[in-house]
Amino acid sequence: MSSNIDTLIKMANDISDFFNADPDKTLAAEGVRNHISRNWELRMRQMIVEHLNNHGGEGLSILAKSAIGQLTF
C-alpha cells in the first residue's frame, strides 16, 4: 500500500476510535461517515472507498469499513 492510503487508513481508524464509544454502532458508523463526508476532500474519500472496494478495506477497523461502505459522492 502507498503511504497515502496508509495515512487515510490511520485517519479513518482514529475517527472510528472516537465514535466507537457510542454503544449504538449504527449511530457510531453514521458519525464516522458524516465526519469523513464533511471534512475529507473528494479525492481522499474516493481513495478510501476504492481501498475498501478493491482491497477489502485491509487495515481498517470494522466500524471504519461500515462507515466507508456508506459513503456517497
Image (tube, helix red, strand yellow):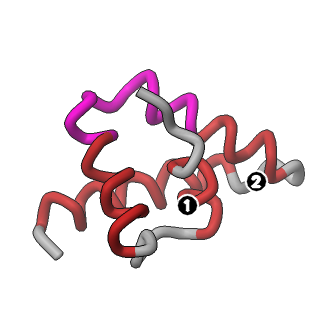
Q: Which mark is residue 40?
A: none
- Asked which secondary structure carries label 1, the reply is helix
Could you tell whether 1 is left or right of 10 in the image?
A: left
Q: Which residues are magenta?
A: 33-45
Foreground: 62 or 22?
62
**Residue denoted by label 2:** 21
Amino acid type of the residue that numbered disc 1 sits on in the rendered structure: Lys
| The C terminus lies in quadrant | top left
Question: How far across and how far down the image is residue 43, in percent?
Answer: 20, 36
Q: Quadrant of the N terminus?
A: bottom left
Residue 44 is a magenta residue = yes
Q: Residue at x 62, y 68 (%)?
A: 62
Residue 54 location (% of width, % of height): 34, 68
Main SS category, magenta section: helix
- Numbered disc in front, either 1 or 2: 1
Residue 46 in the image: x percent, y percent?
Answer: 29, 42
Name the one closer to the observer, 73 or 22.
73
**Residue shown at the point (68%, 46%) measured from the top left:** 29
Mark 1: few, some, or many residues within 10 Å (few <14, many ≥20)? many
The residue lying at 66 percent from left, 47 percent from top is 19
Q: CA distance from mark 1 to mark 2?
A: 16 Å
Identify the residue position indicated by label 1 in the image. 65
**Above or below, 12 relative to 62:** above
